[in-house]
Image: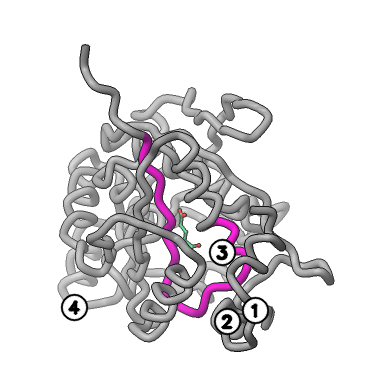
Amino acid sequence: MAAVSPPVFRFAPSPNGYLHLGHAYSALLNQQLARQSGGRLLLRIEDIDLGRCRPEFEATILEDLEWLGLEWETPVRRQSEHFADYAAALQRLKSLGLVYPSFMSRKEIDAAIQASEGRWPHDPLGAPQYPGSERELNADDLASRIASGEDHALRLDMVKALALAGNDLGWTEKAPAGQARITANPSAWGDVILARKDTPTSYHLSVTVDDALQGVTDVVRGMDLYHSTSIHRLLQQLLSLPEPVYHHHPLITAPDGPKLAKSAGSPSLRDMRKQGIRPQDIKRQLGF
Ligand code: GLU
């Protein structure tokens, strides 16, 4: 009988700031679920945003996680070392005719939307959907703009992508109470960006490629990424990648309500560590 491989979990922080309690919860939950199922735990550093990610944040993240008692396999995958993998996936999508260059700035997109009449569709994060106006740019214009070095992003043609992938995409959402099959709704995002103007990939593309390359079977992450899963499932289908199961956990909220975010000035694990708070205090506070 073939041996059954253990499940593979991952915690995937972005080193664009320090970790806070919400990250600690996500990391510890991954560890708990990996241990309970005899699984493996990987750590991935999501540093494609070369302008905002910094080595000192990464170093502190590793220190914080070690201090918390997280144990992960090495080597750690650092996304900035794997741009070639994302380029290969992008090439595959290009060869399927699903990718087009987009030159418009956020300002120009906003102006195009202002000029339209009636209600404009918004994506699941509340941003206005990209209007799709560059989908059919004239080939000669396009070639000369690209040749002249004009900055552009690469977008997924959502209508074509769905025609290829089919409309019955979904995922299995695991929760403590059981599991449910969720219907994916990638079109709610419009023509998402696959490669940004400032970096040759995007969060959606690199996370999907890496989860597959690392053999991740169980994606455990915050509820803030729930709707992103629709895009990840679409990309998996288009790129013939395996489908993991998903577990989106509630976000840890500060006692005064709003979601903990680096920007909201919530104390970082690093600050808490310096104040003499112990890992066991944090684990108890988070219910571990
Ligand atoms: N790097 C992402 C973040 O820090 C998490 C990505 C994921 O778990 O899919 O929010």
Q: CA distance from mark 2 to mark 1?
A: 5 Å
Q: CA distance from mark 3 to mark 1?
A: 14 Å
User: Which structural element holds mark 1?
Assistant: loop
Badge 3: few (under 14), some or many (20 or more) residues near its Cα, within 10 Å? Answer: many
Camera-nearest label, 1 or 4: 1
Specify which label sits upstream in the sequence, 4 or 3: 3
**Which three-letter amino acid code belongs to the residue tagged 1?**
Ile
Camera-nearest label, 4 or 3: 3
Specify which label sits upstream in the sequence, 1 or 4: 4
Q: Position of residue 229 (x, y in %)?
A: 50, 43
112, 230: nearer the viewer? 230
Q: CA distance from mark 2 to mark 3?
A: 12 Å
Q: Residue at x 64, y 79 (%)?
A: 277
Q: Position of residue 241 (x, y in %)?
A: 29, 35
Mark number displayed over residue 277 = 1
Camera-nearest label, 3 or 1: 1
- Identify the residue position indicated by label 2 in the image: 273
Residue 115 visible, this orientation: no
Q: Which residue sits furthest top?
A: 1
Based on the picture, tell me whether residue 17 belongs to the magenta stretch: yes
Camera-nearest label, 4 or 2: 2
- Identify the residue position indicated by label 4 in the image: 148
- Identify the residue position indicated by label 3 in the image: 24
* Residue 84, quarter of the rendered image: bottom left
Left or right: 171 in relation to 54: right
